[in-house]
Amino acid sequence: MERNLSVKSQKTLGRIDVAPEAIAMVAGIAALECFGVVGMSSRSFQDGIAELLLGKENLTKGIEVRLEDNRVIVDLYVIVEYGTKINEVAHNVIENVKYAVENQLGVVATKINVIVTGVRTGSNGNL
């Protein structure tokens, strides 16, 4: 996420800037609330290694927010529960994230991509 970019909203009393990090945090919480999502995965191998070495847990893990031509694009890297219908889980994630971002932040997410990076059993074993 680029730190110098933000979504701007001009109101009569002033300006509101919403940082990509804020969008990512709201999107991450909304995604984890969805049935069938058991976790988020690191966006890249380097992020995963840094997380292991530094032991840092991050609410924006597995989320990339891009601002292109005044459009907000959110990529979510999720791990789903074994036995769930992945297509339905992904659709629910898209709907929940879109609703949360638009209603809590007043930002229109024009595109939300769900990338399923893994499947996990209920006993926390990876498949």
Image (cartoon, rainbow, N blue to C red):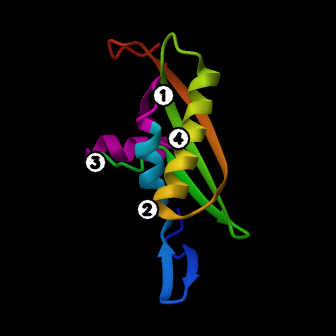
Q: Amino acid at mark 3?
A: Lys
Residue at image coords 57%, 83%: 10
51 vs 44, left or right, is left
Magenta span covers which residues?
32-56
Magenta-drawn stretch contains 36? yes
| 3D distance between C-alphas at marks 4 and 3 | 26 Å
| 3D distance between C-alphas at marks 2 and 1 | 22 Å
Q: Secondary structure at mark 3?
A: loop
Between disc 2 and disc 1, whose residue precedes? 2
Q: Which residue is mark 3?
A: 56
Q: Amino acid at mark 1?
A: Ile
Answer few, some or many: residues within 10 Å of disc 2's Cα (few below 14, many 20 plus, some between 14 and 19): some
Q: Which residue is mark 2?
A: 22
Q: Amino acid at mark 4?
A: Asn
Q: Amino acid at mark 2?
A: Ala
Q: Secondary structure at mark 4?
A: helix
Which mark is drawn over residue 96? Answer: 4
Task: Answer whether labels 4 and 3 touch (C-beta < 8 Å).
Answer: no
Residue at image coords 57%, 77%: 8
Task: Answer whether labels 1 and 3 touch (C-beta < 8 Å).
Answer: no
Answer few, some or many: residues within 10 Å of disc 4's Cα (few below 14, many 20 plus, some between 14 and 19): some
| Outermost right residue | 69
Q: Which residue is mark 1?
A: 79
Between disc 4 and disc 2, whose residue precedes? 2
Residue 9 placed where, x, y %? 57, 78
Task: Answer whether labels 4 and 2 touch (C-beta < 8 Å).
Answer: no
